Image (cartoon, rainbow, N blue to C red):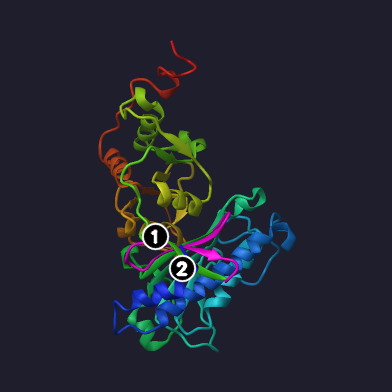
Amino acid sequence: MPLTKRFTLTRYLIEERRRFPGAGGDFNALILDVALACKAIARAVAFGELGGTPGQPAAKVGDVGGAVNVQGETQKPLDVISNQYFTGMNEWGGHLAGMVSEEMEGAYQIPKAYPRGKYLLAFDPLDGSSNIDVNVSVGSIFSILRAPQEVIDSGRDVVESDFLQLGLTQAAAGYALYGPTTMLVLSVGNGVAGFTLDPSLGEFMLTHPNLKVPADTQEFAINASNSRFWEPPVTRYVDECLAGKTGPRDKDFNMRWIASMVAEAHRILMRGGVFLYPRDSKDASKPGRLRLLYEANPIGFIIEQAGGRASTGREPMLGVQPTSLHQRIGLVFGSRHEVERIERYHAEPFKPLETTPLFTERSLFRV
């Protein structure tokens, strides 16, 4: 498509705003500030070891938790840098009342020197940062919420409860993928659009309008090393997929696992699939591994806006009431028919396969 025929992100947002004649420009300006932070992170990621020592643990930096963040995870320098880009590029514009991040224990207050706005921003500044050392795609995830009216009217500091909103109420959600190309995937509640960063212009250009997740798939993604901790419905589903044409599904499946949820979500948006990071018994104190506010909810919003489905396995993800800023949860998302099957298995009594995939017709242990 000729360059002159492509929409920039700015034009796309203006066209979307025209659907709401009374809308101001704060929402668009906020998304453009988020996009700018993503561009800065993309540049830092692209430089890799040339820009410092991304593979080494971070030294203590400001309020971001130092070498170990609030999640108990070792930070990479790019975790800290990415968090600083998000806060620094979004605190001054007057669009936000506050922020929350994976890398900060509490809510981030907008400095008194800047005006405060009517939105809240929740983000994971660098998802999949453990992949940096091996040059695998990483990304950023963000969710935009409306601040409670009382916060807007009073201008008070935000508190934890202000962010504890259902995923259904998100005003927008998106992610940036830092891979062979840098992409921004965005939903403002009217479908999903993908933008590719044109390095010669420094602009995100609309390249993937109206993204849709196919309802059916033959591809699933799960961390099989946790199989001994899975709940029976998950074991049943995976065993059936592995059984292939000789099993009850009567078709072969491929298995994927990148360990970067942004990369997994992007693959599913591009060609379908299902991603499972379910609740398990590995650590009884954690009812899941992913964070509800700034990972599961924004990805769930995007997937559902693209015609897919996002779930805990037991209930729709976007209907879960958050109880804390860093709440963890199990997540299943992707092609609708597969997610619905997994939900159905959670509602039914466990029915193990008569033979395990290791002893099927195509097995090395065939008898």
Q: Position of residue 190 (x, y in %)?
A: 32, 66
- The magenta-colored residue range is 178-201
Q: Is residue 345 part of the magenta span, yes or no?
A: no
Residue at the image position 35 percent from the left and 60 percent from the top: 210
Tell me which amino acid carries mark 1.
Asn
| Residue 297, label in figure | 1
Q: Nearer the viewer, residue 66 or 358?
A: 358
| Residue 170 seen from this side | yes
SS for dot 2: strand
Residue 157 vs residue 42: left or right?
left
Instruction: Name which of mark 1 and mark 2 comes first in the sequence.
Output: 2
Residue 105: x and y, percent?
A: 53, 67
Spot the residue most to the top.
367
On screen, 206 above or below 360?
below
- Using residue 10 as the reference point, say whether residue 217 is left or right of it: left
Q: Which mark is residue 173?
A: none
Number of marks: 2
Above or below residue 283? Residue 28 is below
Extreme residue toward the front, this view? 2
The residue tagged 2 is 122
Residue 52 appears in view = no
Q: Image point 46% across, 68% down: which residue?
A: 122
Which secondary structure, mark 1?
A: helix
Image: 242 above or below 217: above
Which x, y percent locates residue 167?
34, 63
- Quadrant the C terminus occupies: top left
